[in-house]
Image (tube, rainbow, N blue to C red):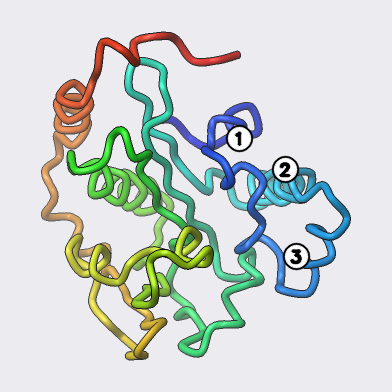
Amino acid sequence: MFSLTLDRLQDLPEPCVTCIFWELDPALAAGSIAGGDPGLDKESWLSSALLEWGSVGQIAYVDGTPAGYITYAPPHLVPRAVAFPTAPVSADALMLMTARVIPDFSGQGLGRVLVQGAAKDVMRRGVRAVEAFGYRGDLDSPKAACLIPADFLTAVGFKTVREHRTYPRLRLDLRTALTWREDMEAAVERLLASVRSPSLSHGRRA
């Protein structure tokens, strides 16, 4: 697991590498897309977030190949958050934006590992809780790629704090995360070893 940095931004899968769904409010995002280069706005947002708050995401690699990633940030750095019907995110919580596992590595528990890694990172910085807008809509919708299924969030320990038929807001109290095993790094290594494939054993691209 490595922190998401400007150097590693290009390791996000398409279309995530240029997606600005969370990073800009809807009007600015539409203008950026119309302008033809949302990737620059993605880089600008990440640069500002890193300077203001520090790490806002992690990437998991298997033999140098990006296998999944997760992003999170203080709510004031996530303009899209205010557009949801179950907003706002609680004042004491960080916002979980996106968690995605590359299809070749799905079904191995990597999504749970990503959430645990994010929780451990933000607990070290004194954050009390993480909240997310879950999704219960059509999983084939383009919007679904930018949202986290509510069922997944509940499966990894999130609890609903504001119900909605499509966009419930869920919360993970990080005090409960203290019960997670302290040797999470070893568990991550075992998991990543279990999903390694000889056909994917090439190094990271430059």
Q: CA distance from mark 2 to mark 3?
A: 14 Å
53 vs 102, nearest the viewer: 102
Q: How many other residues sit within 10 Å of disc 1, few (<14), some (14-19) or many (≥20)?
A: some
Label 2 amino acid?
Answer: Glu
Q: How many other residues sit within 10 Å of disc 3, few (<14), some (14-19) or many (≥20)?
A: some
Q: How many other residues sit within 10 Å of disc 2, few (<14), some (14-19) or many (≥20)?
A: many
Residue 128 shows in this picture: no
Q: Is 165 situated above or below 4?
A: below
Q: Is 22 situated above or below 62?
A: below
84 vs 200, nearest the viewer: 200
Quarter holding residue 152: bottom left
Point out the image quarter for the N terminus.
Answer: top left
State yes or no: discs 1 and 2 in contact (Cβ < 8 Å): yes
Secondary structure, mark 3, is helix
- Foreground label between 1 and 3: 3
Secondary structure, mark 2, is helix
Q: Residue at x 43, y 30 (%)?
A: 2
State yes or no: discs 1 and 3 in contact (Cβ < 8 Å): no
Q: Earlier in the sequence, mark 1 or mark 3?
A: 1
For disc 1, the marked residue is 9
14 vs 184, nearest the viewer: 14
Q: Position of residue 51 (x, y in %)?
A: 69, 45
For disc 3, the marked residue is 29
Q: Position of residue 110 (x, y in %)?
A: 25, 41
For disc 2, the marked residue is 43
The answer to whether residue 197 is left or right of residue 65 is left
